[in-house]
Amino acid sequence: MSADIAQSPAAVVGPRPTNVRWVIVAMTGLTTAVAMMGRLDLGVLGKSIQDEFAFNTQTMGWIFSAFVFAYHPFQIPGGWAGDRFGPRKIFTFAILLWAVATAAMGVVARFSLTEWIGLAWSFAILRFLVGMGEAPMSPNAARVVASWMDRKRRGIGVSFHMIGIGLGGALSPLLITWIAQRWGWRPSFYLAGACGTIVALLWWFYSTDRPEDHPRVNAAELSLIRSGRADHDAGEETGFGTQQRTPWVKIFSSLSVWGILLSYFCQGYMPTIYSTWFFIYLERVRGLTLLQGGLWGSLPFLTIMVLAPLGGLLSDYWVAKLGKRRGRRMTVWLGMGGSALLIWAGVHTANNTIAMLMLGAAAGLNYFALPSWWATCIDLTPEHSGALSGLMNMSSGGWLSPILTAYIVIHFGWTPALDVAALVTAMGALLWFFVDASKTLEKPSAETAAG
């Protein structure tokens, strides 16, 4: 009788895995969704702020770019800090920083500091602090996925971060314009800061750096997460804070890494336009009202919310069928190639509805490709994914696009400015000829052999 019981399905299978890992990666999407509200506030309300304070186009371009001047340089230290101290602490601190700086944008005109450095510089400094706070979020999201997801689900794992971008980007313009029409532009900054503070507290009290430390993770879920890893996760053996040194020499001598960095520069160029100049483009060039601009301005982010997880799933599927090298490439080529074509076609289409549909779909296809970049960072350096993904995110061309777009608009017009964006996007696809996600930069393991 005891032998029969031992061989029963329930005894063999055991308890079902818990699903805490999915809650954790979903929380990375929630933090991004809330951060998008703080990031988009200035873009959506840029015309109102520009008109109230008489900022010229070039000044607004520099205020917009103050965000990326901090966002990009702080990627590497933010990602390294996540590898070193764990993403729980870094996420919480980062969210609180950008939340406070965002809320302060609503009262910046009352600061006595503006008498010394001017109002434009005051806006720029706060925008810089917002960028500093948001910088660690993306590389630490990759660090979370590296620790919490099994190697077969890295693409879909990192896509939750992009879903947050799409969700926040889709809802924020509608909410921001609704608030602005009733109470002016300032309250939306206060709301973004309050939401950020709440999310920071949720992250601090629910998340843990490692699945082993979470009280709700059972042994079955932990076994799923660790499947296919002979050396397990670095955090499991050594713990955050005692990890090996980041292999910077190997990283900077890798052709795949340089392919990732250069192509990611191209990938990030157009999305920054969507969150800065795009709403002004809709109002000034396409002739839309503030409310219409908010509605159409949400479309690119709706397509991101739909297509980013699809790209993550397809990337993982093609990796399983074709291997990491071809599987990651195929997703990038499909997404970035389609995005470049739709940007060019949309800009040259006179009909507003068709043009907006094309430009919205172009944003979705750009983010359809994006999970492959982040998953490749984990493929190449699973133990140091925060540092490599921070380096990658720092290389994004988002810092250049607001300034260069303003320059081209002033001297040549809006159509050439967006034609340049289409060309840069196409270059991002071509550069993936140099990326091989199967060549890990860390010590050989069962995972390397399986890749």
Image (spheres, rainbow, N blue to C red):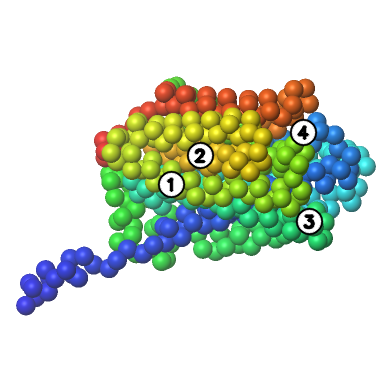
Per the image, the residue denoted by label 1 is 310
Q: Amino acid at mark 2?
A: Leu
N-terminal label among 3 and 2: 3
The residue at 63%/26% (across/down) is 419
> How far is the residue under mark 1 from the one under mark 4?
35 Å
- Point out residue 403 in the picture as x, y percentages from the top left corner: 72, 29
Tag 1 near tag 4, CB within 8 Å = no
Placement of the N terminus among the 4 image quadrants: bottom left
> How far is the residue under mark 1 from the one under mark 3?
34 Å
* Farthest right residue in view: 115
* Farthest front residue in view: 351
Per the image, the residue denoted by label 2 is 365
Q: Amino acid at mark 1?
A: Leu
- Point out residue 451 in the picture as x, y percentages from the top left corner: 30, 36
**Residue 281 lies in what quarter of the image?**
top right
Under tag 4, what secondary structure? helix
> In this rendering, would 206 be left or right of 149?
right
Per the image, the residue denoted by label 3 is 180
Per the image, the residue denoted by label 4 is 62
